[in-house]
Each structure stands twice: as structure tokens, then as C-alpha cells.
Image (cartoon, rainbow, N blue to C red):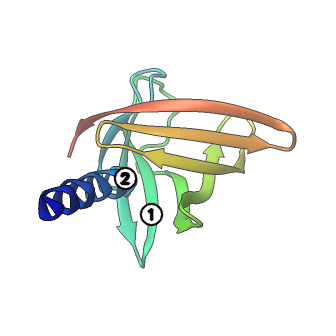
Amino acid sequence: MNILITTILFSLMTISLSAQEMTAGIWLTGEENTKIETYQKDGLWYGKIVSSDNPKAKIAKDILKDFVKIDGEWKGSLYAAKKDRLLNAVIIPSEEQLNITVSAGMFKKKLSWEKVGK
């Protein structure tokens, strides 16, 4: 009985931890059919534009930069094209979504990107 309980608890912990790891993939931002590809380079995570219906979107531009796990959260910067600057951001990843909180001073905005490919 103890082995069964231990196995179940370990499985639940593994699922919980894996749901919070960054993964490479293609994500739909929900704005102008823009798709971002996440990838890892030199131990940090990035995200670049791979396609968009916005004619001003710069394909291959990194808009997620330098994301690293700190105290259980993925922290880095998100490029805000309208403001033409990098803003602090925190990502909470899951298998099918990236939930992003972007901070600009006292203001925060939440974004949710859906996974559409590997």
C-alpha cells in the first residue's frame, strides 16, 4: 500500500514539474495570426516571429529574450513593438499554453499563447 501511495505521489509531482518547464514549439499569440517559435540557446530561452499577417512584423526577430527559471518562475524580457522596447515578463508554461505576464512599471498585462506546433 505504501509503495502505491509513493508511486502516485511521485507521478503527480513529476506531472506538475514537467508542466512548468519551457519547451520548444510554435505558439499562436492571438494577434494578427502571429506565430512565435520558442527555442533554447546557451541555456536561455528565446522566441522569434516565424509568421504573421501583420505586414510590419519582422520575421525572425526575437521577441522573447533571455528567459531563465528563477525561484520557480521563467523570467526574461518581451519586446513590445508598439513601445519599441523590452519589458519585464514572467512565463508560466504548460503543454498547450504559455501564460505570460508583462510588466511596465505598475502596469501589468496578461497574455495567453496557444501551442500550434513543435
The image quarter in which residue 113 lies = top left
Residue under the image location 35 percent in, 58 percent down: 17
Question: Residue beneath label 1, please?
Answer: 45
Q: Is 50 on the left or on the right of 61, as rendered?
A: left
Looking at the picture, which amino acid does disc 2 mark?
Thr
Between residue 77 and residue 110, name the one nearer to us: 110
How far apart marks 1 and 2 lie (CA) works out to 7 Å
Q: Are marks 1 and 2 in contact (CB under 8 Å)?
A: yes
Quarter of the figure that contains the N terminus: bottom left
Counting from the top left corner in percent of width and height, residue 104 is at 80, 42
Residue under the image location 20 percent in, 46 percent down: 118
Between residue 26 and residue 72, name the one nearer to us: 72
Counting from the top left corner in percent of width and height, residue 81 is at 65, 38
Q: Is mark 2 on a helix, strand or loop?
A: strand
The tag on residue 38 is 2
Residue under the image location 71 percent in, 49 percent down: 87
Counting from the top left corner in percent of width and height, residue 25 is at 28, 48
Q: Is 62 on the left or on the right of 14, as rendered?
A: right
Looking at the picture, which amino acid does disc 1 mark?
Trp
65 relative to 16, above or below: below
110 relative to 14, above or below: above
- Number of numbered callouts drawn: 2
* Residue lying farthest to the right in this orientation: 106
* Residue lying farthest to the front in this orientation: 1
